[in-house]
Image: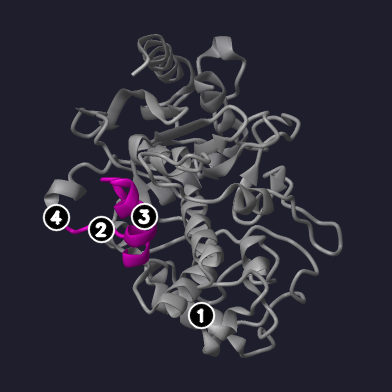
Amino acid sequence: MDQHAQEATTHALNQAIATLGETGLQAAAIHQGTMVVNAVAGIADVSTGALVTPDTLFPVFSMSKGVTATIVHRLVERGVLAYDEPLARWWPAFAAHGKGGISVRHALSHRTGLQTFKNLDRSEYPSLDATGRNLEDATPEYAPGASMGYHGMTFGTLLGKVIEGATGKPFAQVLHEEITGPLGIPDLYCGVPDVPAVTDRIAALLPGGIPDSATGLVAMTDAERAPLAVTSAERGKREFQTGCMPAGGMITNAGSIVRMYGAMREPGLDGVRMLTPETIANATVPYFGADGRHIEWVGRMGLGYVIGGSPHLGCGVVIPSPWPDSFGHTGLGGSLAMYCPSRDLAVALTKNALMPGRLECHTWDLVM
């Protein structure tokens, strides 16, 4: 560890708790292949007073998309998948209702016309089979590539079903074979094992607290707090923790997920490289719909990754960093992980206090 960086980051996390309404946090960084920061602060569960440790696990919501995208890119590198082949090549039932032309590239770039599940009870979200059947019966809102809109949960089903179809293996097994196994990552799950040694370490989510008046930030309204409270309670249910939701259901800690991004460097991490520089360059080209639309609150979206370098437009727009070559993904409430090739720096932030969009970026700014 870099003692100065560790102390500065710990101070930033404690400052976020004191002034921004955070509760429990982790931040980790890998620079030039070496872990330089693995800092923690605060409370993991306010009902018990349990403190955050480096082993505490956090639901990271859409940070999951960056992991799923990485699996897809690795499979493309080996010829198991192909960007411009239809999803139906590996998932034949998906072709129904005019979906035969939707490709892996369309899914990675949020341009399939299938932004949400229709007529699906949220209790079925943790089942890749149930969400897959829903999309098999769905009709796209527009032709592939014609427009662009954030695929909050459907992103994971579209790509998760194709990953399973192409490999013949469950998604969680592919995650282990492609990422967690090679990198020796102890805690990155799409469906945690239902054993106390794991489930007892999961932090309890809650809506964010009240920012200090000196920050000039307005506390969240009841209208902002209500859906975050519902989400916090929902993700505390065991079926959501043990189910597989590749777009928004992964559970990890900062020290684990930062290893995936740290292994994006060309020499790799501990002898393992996630993606080639050519793949990264291809995956970090911004995408738009044919109508010019993009995902406004993201800034720039590539093939499964949010791309840095956008102007800082406030907390409605969450970007990995001001560095144009950085890439990664944010998660609901303010978590984020990214890698910057020009600085050979990977950073991850995990947390349990869920902030509304307009407050999400302040803790990340402190850490960076």
Say if mark 1 contacts mark 4, CB within 8 Å: no
In the rendered structure, which disc, 4 or 3, sits on the residue that comes first in sequence?
4
Q: Residue at x 42, y 37 (%)?
A: 258
Q: Is residue 23 shown above or below 64? A: above
Q: Is residue 179 magenta?
A: yes
Q: Nearer the viewer, residue 36 or 170?
A: 36
Label 1 crowd (10 A; few <14 / some 14-19 / many >=20): some
Q: Amino acid at mark 1?
A: Asn
Residue 195's label in the rendered image is 4
Quadrant of the snapshot with the C terminus: top right
Q: Is residue 12 shown above or below 335? A: above
Which residue matches tag 1? Answer: 134
Q: Nearer the viewer, mark 4 or mark 3?
A: 4
Q: Nearer the viewer, mark 2 or mark 4?
A: 4
> Which secondary structure lies at badge 2?
helix
| Relative horizontal placement of residue 38, taking residue 276 as reference (left or right) | left
Q: Residues in magenta?
A: 173-194
Say if mark 2 contacts mark 1, CB within 8 Å: no
User: Disc 2 and disc 1: Cα gap in Å?
Assistant: 23 Å
| Relative horizontal placement of residue 73, taking residue 60 as reference (left or right) | right
User: Disc 1 and disc 4: Cα gap in Å?
Assistant: 30 Å
Q: Is residue 131 shown above or below 351? A: below
Q: Is residue 349 shown above or below 257? A: above
User: Disc 1 and disc 3: Cα gap in Å?
Assistant: 21 Å
Q: Amino acid at mark 2?
A: Arg
Choose top left, top right, bottom left or bottom right for residue 304: bottom right
Q: Amino acid at mark 3?
A: Glu
